[in-house]
Image: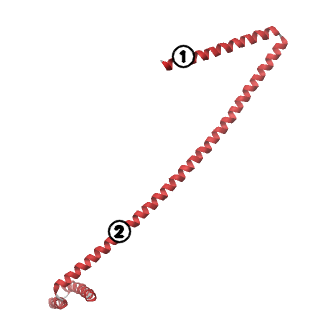
Amino acid sequence: AVADDAYARSLAKRVLRALVLNATLCARERYVATLASTFRYMVLVGGPFQWWRSVAAESAARHRRRAAAVALRDRQLRQRAWVRWARYHAACQRAALAYRHREHVLQRVVLKRWLVLHARHVQARERERRAVRRWSLSLRRACWRHWRAYITHRRERHRSMAAAVVHAQRGEQRRALA
């Protein structure tokens, strides 16, 4: 029955093609004769209803195939989107890692620079203190009274500076509380 259906369908297609050709190109007698033979074959197969049923079945099968193809395509697209997202995520992670590494390197460079500058500063302060101490000792050896006046003056200056600092801190505290 299925083979008969398939044969009937292929024959009907061929005949319809021939009908179009005959209608456009051939004479009226051949067209009518082909039409009559087609209807005769349809009646022989089992009436036009059988033929329409096979057409409906074919269209349903075509719809099923189309739906399956669409589902497959959808699945493939979802999979590709997931793969693309995973690649993008990995690239983002790599970029973040590289950025953090670069930031770390820059921090190390900055720290090294600061350490160098700080060491220079400390050395300069140390040199300055040594120079002042040398001068102070030479002054002490030369003239005790002048050295004593210098030391007293220095102590007073330091005391007044410390008092100014304390005064400023207390003022800040007062402002913070008020």
Identify the secondary structure beneath mark 2: helix
The Cα atoms of the two marked residues, 1 and 2, are separated by 77 Å
Which of the two discs, 1 and 2, labels the residue nearer the N terminus?
2
Q: Amino acid at mark 2?
A: Ala
Considering only vertical position in the picture, is 167 above or below 22?
above
Write the residue at 19% across / 81% down. 52
Q: Nearer the viewer, residue 92 or 173?
A: 173
x, y percentage for residue 9?
25, 85
Q: Amino acid at mark 1?
A: Gly
Write the residue at 64% across / 42% down. 108
x, y percentage for residue 163?
63, 14
Q: Which residue is mark 2?
A: 71
Q: Which residue is mark 1?
A: 171
Write the residue at 49% across / 58% down. 87
- Please tell me in which quadrant of the rendered image residue 124 appears: top right
Q: Judge left or right: residue 35 versus residue 96.
A: left
